[in-house]
Image (tube, rainbow, N blue to C red):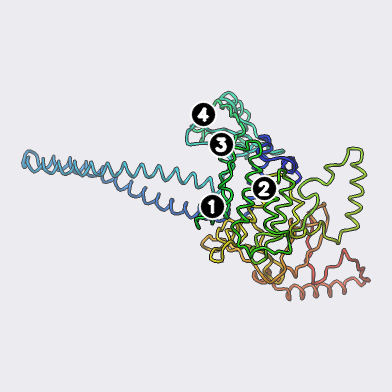
Amino acid sequence: LGEAFVRKLAITEYNKLSVQDRTSCLAALCSAVLECPSLYQELEAAMREKDSLMKRLREVQRDEKKLRIALTTSSSAAAAAAAANGSDGAADQQAQKAEDEELKQAQKAELADLVVEKEEILARVQIVTDEINRMPLGLDRRFNRYWHLKLSQEKGDAFLLIEDASDHSLRIVKDKASLDTLMSKLNPRGFRESKLIKALEKKAQDILPCLPAQSCKVTPPEASMDFMTGFKTEAWAICSKEYRKPPSSEVDYAEHPKTFLVEKLKADLLDVHYTLPSDAFDDEAWDGPSVWIAKVKSATKVYDLRDILGELEGAIKDKYLDADHFNRSPRVVPGAWVPRDADFDDDNDEDQGASQSQGADDDDDEEEGYIANEGDVSWLPPTTSALQYRLRCLDAACTFRRSTKPMCVRIDAYKYIQRDNPRNKDGTNFTVIAANGQAKVTTTYTRERNRSAFPAFPEASLVNAGDFMLNYQDFQKQFRKIGFDFAQVAKHKATEAEEEEEIVEEPEESSASEDQSDDEFYVKGT
């Protein structure tokens, strides 16, 4: 939040960002994916696959060992039988020799198949292991981490990277001379560097083919018009199933080469309105469908389309929207996605910062931001990317037909990108991962939903506080599940208090910051 690419997305389209900004955006998305429950599902699935592969690998290795022993014993047995029979029974010897040779060839073919299967299993085990936990080769004395990253199955398509421990910047070992210099600088007696030397020597056969490092030219992809306009909405899919012609099918984007993204947004708006039932709109919330359609067709600016999208949102009745996945009245926090002082002059930065801090002190008990009214989307950035994202969320949350559930309910992926609703009396809010690896997301339809667009940040972590207090009553259920007995703790505290009174008889000083009653769980800050 507040990064450069976020501020640029507020005023421009994504396809106009630089490679660096797109990389930062991708890194932010990766961080968001690492926090979602579906990642744990993938990890558990990879672990189960690895267990099955290792079981099969042991079976293959056992069968391979038996075949090698059988081939060795059959050869020695045939030689011993030939020496014992001598010249007698030459015809029988020839027949037995032919049978032994046929059996030997079959065993060799089976052995070759087992060797190939073992190599495939080992390669797959390595891939699954990297998916579960990709570990660096090692660390040096400055705690810099060394990585060997493969970009494909080809040995030359890889890099030996050094990640700086201070700023996490990456450097590439460019050639063998640099690698030799690096190896000479490492201390073989060091605790970390001795392990790093062994890892580099073990990986030498994989590292040397990728040296010297090839230059990697990165050019931003230029998506074609067909690619950018080819993603259809759920409304379009329903119309196609019903053999109806949606309004977007009549639009020729080639006639608008400079404004085709605006035309795409207008066509998707008309598709959503066209597919919804006629009784899905509240007549008092807008000027009517005919006026709204005329506004869409005549709009030329993104600012106008933002207001038109908000008018559509506000007109849809509640029963046709899944409120658990689409919030028409979010709490908008100014400065949550761009700095509040982005438009301030440099001369006034200190004054503005002082006034903001003073206002923050006065309004500590008040919630920041405001709750947007239904149909008010003025907080959205005026770009086609932002409006398309909001429209796709609306499209996924709409109940277009009674017999068809909204797309956000049918597709499990929507469960993993939404914040769960409070479901316990103590306010706890968890996504449960079942034993079979499935994520169980529970919601409530009776309790008041958290309408904040951004979760509250713990105030204790905003400053380097020495001590802070947490109310353990919020965690009573969780503590009791693990066998934590509050009665014993209270009894122990009372005993300690009596002992202290016997030793030192002094009046107690009461203050709000030092009160450690039974209703509080005291934690020392670091």
Residue sticking out furthest to the top: 177
* Whether residue 194 is visible: no
Q: Is residue 152 above or below residue 458?
A: above
The residue beneath circle 4 is 208
Where does the image place residue 241, in percent across and percent down from the top left? 50, 56
Say the numbered circle drawn on residue 297.
Answer: 2
Identity, as a three-letter code, of the amino acid under mark 2: Lys
Q: Is residue 297 above or below residue 459?
A: above
Structural crowding at the residue carrying mark 1, measured as other residues with C-alpha within 10 Å and reported as few (<14), some (14–19) or many (≥20): few
Q: Earlier in the sequence, mark 4 or mark 2?
A: 4
Q: Is residue 281 above or below residue 425?
A: above
- Real-space Cα separation, disc 3 to disc 1, in angstroms: 53 Å
Q: Quadrant of residue 442?
A: bottom right
Identity, as a three-letter code, of the amino acid under mark 4: Leu
| Helix, strand or loop for disc 4 | helix
| Helix, strand or loop for disc 3 | strand
User: Residue at coordinates 83% horizontally, 55% vertically from top-left?
Assistant: 466
In the image, is 464 to the left or to the right of 117?
right
Callouts 4 and 1 close, C-beta under 8 Å: no
- Real-space Cα separation, disc 2 to disc 1, in angstroms: 18 Å
The residue beneath circle 1 is 245
The residue beneath circle 3 is 148
- Real-space Cα separation, disc 4 to disc 2, in angstroms: 62 Å
